[in-house]
Image (spheres, rainbow, N blue to C red):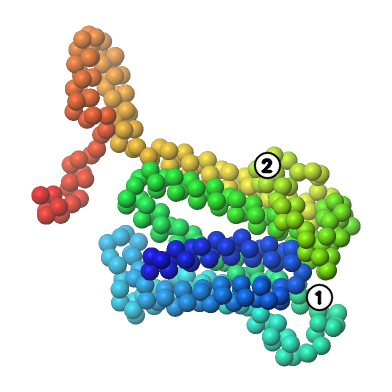
């Protein structure tokens, strides 16, 4: 199961990066490499869906592990099954197969463009796999936390940075996808920068980094990028980018601060305790030599760290206390 989880973690990261690029910058999503990639990915995710019905579930308070298959099934169906199922089913290909069965000339009519656009939107359902990625990362964080506290903290900070970069990547793809679904209006940023030729049906050579620079600028609230948005769609997308970016930035600062403070909580408690002792000695105007004796006592007694030993031992059962 460990190797399977690691394989699924790599698959999910690859999917969450490659799928938005394919949906946004490639006109044809029915090419052989793209179909093979999606089929292999969907197969693995469906297998993972089945395995989840045979995997034990830890209760929220960590007091019990559910191993009964019937209870596992009920628990999984009530929680993440719907999201995992929707993100694993190739809805876009199913839709294309159904449409071809209804009308064999579908791609020769004016309806074809609308269908292609709709399949691109359906492909976005695969991005719901982000929920699985978050759950798998949480499991790995717990593994690191049980072994190395510092590694766990570093892992969490890396996860925060990675999540911000992933959202920036998605936002950059969205900045290009929306004008493309509108047939590139004259006042959109793609047309203004002369990128419509590169985005023609015969060419998919538009560098994926083109929308990433303004997206990064928006999400970091630095500015509008190369130029201010002109169309109403670009204005709304820019506002969305800035709101998401400001939220992520605030979350990153808050999480980073909490992680740094929790790295050595016992030393921090000792420092707070000794600060009170110093204020007490200063208030009572104790002699310097007596203060030094108290300082040496605390250093020898607690060695720079303070634990609520009675509370910790009181929570353990009798064999562990002995």
Between 79 and 295, the one nearer to me in the picture: 295
Which residue does the image show at 21% across and 20% down from the upper left? Answer: 296
Image quadrant for the N terminus?
bottom left
- Residue 210: tell me if it is visible: yes
Residue 209 image position (x, y, % from top left):
71, 52
Q: Residue 102 occupies which quadrant of the picture? A: bottom right
The number of callouts visible is 2
Is the residue 126 above or below the residue 238 in the image?
below
Badge 1 crowding class, 10 Å Cα cut-off, few under 14, some 14 to 19, many 20 or more, is: some
Residue 138 image position (x, y, % from top left):
43, 57
Which mark's residue is nearer the viewer, 2 or 1? 1
Is the residue 306 above or below the residue 143 in the image?
above
* Left or right: 201 in relation to 67: right
Sequence-wise, the earlier of marks 2 and 1 is 1
Badge 2 crowding class, 10 Å Cα cut-off, few under 14, some 14 to 19, many 20 or more, is: some
The residue that label 2 is drawn on is 221
Which residue does the image show at 30% across and 77% down from the upper left? Answer: 68
* Left or right: 87 in relation to 148: right
Contact flag, marks 2 and 1 (Cβ < 8 Å): no
The residue that label 1 is drawn on is 113
Is the residue 78 above or below the residue 303 in the image?
below
Which residue does the image show at 33% across and 65% down from the upper left? Answer: 58
- Residue 218: tell me if it is visible: no
Q: Residue furthest right?
A: 186
Which residue does the image show at 40% across and 59% down from the upper left? Answer: 139
Q: Residue 173 occupies which quadrant of the picture? A: bottom right
């Amino acid at each position: 199961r460990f190797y399977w989880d690691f394989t699924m973690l790599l698959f999910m990261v690859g999917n969450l990066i490659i799928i938005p690029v394919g949906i946004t910058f490639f006109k044809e999503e029915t090419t052989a490499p793209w179909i093979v990639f999606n089929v292999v990915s969907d197969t693995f995710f469906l297998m993972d869906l089945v395995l989840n019905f045979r995997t034990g579930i830890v209760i929220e308070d960590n007091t019990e592990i559910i191993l009964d298959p019937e209870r596992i099934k009920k628990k999984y169906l009530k929680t993440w099954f719907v999201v995992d199922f929707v993100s694993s089913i190739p809805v876009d290909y199913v839709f294309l197969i159904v449409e071809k069965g209804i009308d064999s000339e579908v791609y020769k009519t004016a309806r074809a463009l609308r269908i292609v656009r709709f399949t691109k939107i359906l492909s976005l359902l695969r991005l719901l796999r982000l929920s699985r990625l978050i759950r798998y990362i949480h499991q790995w964080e717990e593994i690191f936390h049980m072994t190395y506290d510092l590694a766990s903290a570093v892992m969490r900070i890396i996860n925060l940075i990675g999540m911000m970069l992933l959202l920036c990547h998605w936002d950059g793809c969205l900045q290009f996808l929306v004008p493309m679904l509108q047939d590139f209006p004259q006042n959109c940023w793609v047309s203004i920068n002369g990128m419509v030729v590169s985005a023609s049906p015969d060419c998919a050579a538009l560098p994926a980094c083109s929308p990433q620079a303004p997206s990064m600028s928006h999400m970091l609230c630095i500015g509008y990028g190369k130029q201010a948005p002109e169309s109403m769609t670009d204005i709304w997308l820019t506002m969305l980018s800035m709101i998401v970016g400001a939220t992520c930035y605030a979350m990153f600062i808050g999480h980073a601060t909490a992680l740094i403070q929790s790295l050595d909580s016992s030393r921090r408690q000792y420092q707070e305790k000794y600060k009170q002792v110093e204020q007490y000695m200063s208030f009572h105007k104790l002699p310097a030599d007596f203060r030094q004796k108290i300082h040496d006592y605390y250093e020898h007694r607690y060695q720079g760290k303070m634990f609520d030993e009675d509370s910790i031992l009181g929570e353990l059962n009798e064999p562990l206390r002995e």
